[in-house]
Amino acid sequence: MKTSLPITKGVDYWTKRISDQEMPALCSTIRDLEKLAKDDVSSLASLGRSVMHDNALTTRILRVANSAIYNKGTSHVTTVSRAAVVLGFDTIRNICITAKLLTSLLENHNLSESVYQRLIKLMAHSFQAAMLSRVMLKDYDEALREEVFIASLLYRIGESAFWSVGGDFVDNLDQTLLTATSAKDEKAIVREYLGTSFSQLTQSIARAWGLGDVLTTSLSHPDERMPEIRSIFLANEIIEALNQPHINTEKLNELLSAAAEIQNISLEQCKARFSRCAEATVRLAEDYGAIELVQHLPETAEIISELDKPAEKPVFREANLVLQLKKLRELTELAIQKADFNQVVQTTLEGILDGVGVDRCAVMLLSPNRKQLSARIAFGEGAEKLKQELLIEMQGGSNPFMQSINQKQANWLHEFDERELNELASFVNANFDPNHFKHGFMIAPIVVNEKTIGLFYADKHISPKQVTQQDFDSFCHLTQLANLCFGLSVH
């Protein structure tokens, strides 16, 4: 049941609630640290006293202060005050804020599992963006690098803080967002629930907590050309690109090129620097005691290395009538022999792939409860990926997969508009790119003992040529003969 929206909603409501009720300790710590930053005389001693009562926080701060990233060969520090002397007040202040933020968010045990995983993933991405932005300013002074690090880390504090609230209202929004089919849909849903956007909430919290000019400027004027603002924007865009289910290599290379330009280095040097940064991010997360983040960090080094590999030229198959006839004869022979299911499937898919001339084809089978349809055997370009990602939820009146099974009829679907593509996407596993349906696809029922157990599937997702009526007729001929084989094998 959907919980009603709060009577008082909007950016002011959520800022006050998060600051006063949900995260008062973090809010108080940040405000205290900002006050100390303005008091040059007593700031170091006061800093030590301000965290002394929190043993876990002190331990994390010292572990990070002595890490390879911050302690460049100096002696081991054993107190927060001493760490501030060695590393500088700004650095230790930001380590304090980071440690307190991670503690406040990741040790929240009042969240549902789904919301907690969403929060961890969000924090992992913010943490790596912070590291990337810091690396991009490698040649700038340490104070600016630290300010950029903390600004990147807090770039989505509004969203992170909201999810940490927990409760039925938050759970309902989490589940509703799972139904969104685009980023635009997600933003509309959030605005409906909260009366504001996550971005506006972050800006409001940044002002209320006094989080500094760099963060507020990066939020209000992300297109600023200042290196610190540009690095924050690019870091977040790069992390967003790295975490897509389907990496847009062209866009990612553009972002990496822009990052290289900021650093005044070559694209290859930038990629190498970011790959090393990914390793350092894992180590620093462990030093902060935030091991939960590691599983949600993208495989940056591996993804970047793949960008440098020359793309293999895809194979565009053409219809081969001679091979089609050969496979039809083989199926006829299999029908006479009452061959088993796997032999028939193998021959049929070979005929569809190389005879009809599609990019890929598959056998999709229904789950025992008939609520899901998944690709079990696949041939062609991207066949393994198709098996992993093509999962259909058998619901919805306009679901063409379900209609084909219920009516025991083959279907050729093509010429989709954006609304129809979005509707198709609502039936398919979120990891599957619905744009693969743009050139159309063919499906036909698999009938065994008069019961439909799944579908034959074929498409041209990369070929410049689209499926034709002749292709569909040939596809139907092969799948009908396959069903004849299945029928004879059970008698």
Image (tube, grey):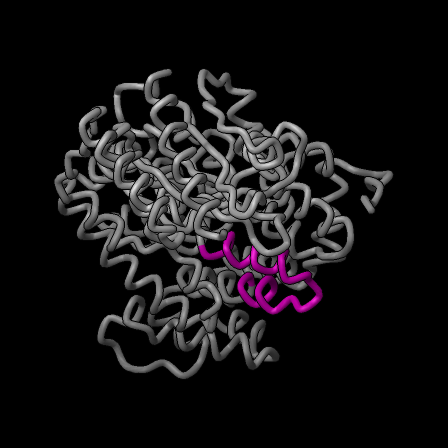
**Where residue 92 sits in the image (x, y, percent)?**
43, 65
**Where residue 6 sits in the image (x, y, percent)?**
83, 42
Identity of the residue drawn at 54% across and 71% down = 46
Determine if residue 184 is in view: no
**Where residue 215 sits in the image (x, y, percent)?**
48, 42
Q: Is 358 positioned to the left or the right of 9 in the image?
A: left
Q: Nearer the viewer, residue 472 or 385?
A: 472
Determine if residue 297 is in view: yes
Q: How many marks?
A: 0
**Where residue 162 sits in the image (x, y, percent)?**
66, 49
Q: Is 181 positioned to the left or the right of 162 in the image?
A: left
Q: Is residue 96 above or below residue 391?
A: below
Q: Which residues are magenta?
A: 101-124
Q: Nearer the viewer, residue 487 or 262?
A: 487
Q: Nearer the viewer, residue 133 or 269?
A: 269
Identity of the residue drawn at 55% across and 79% down = 56
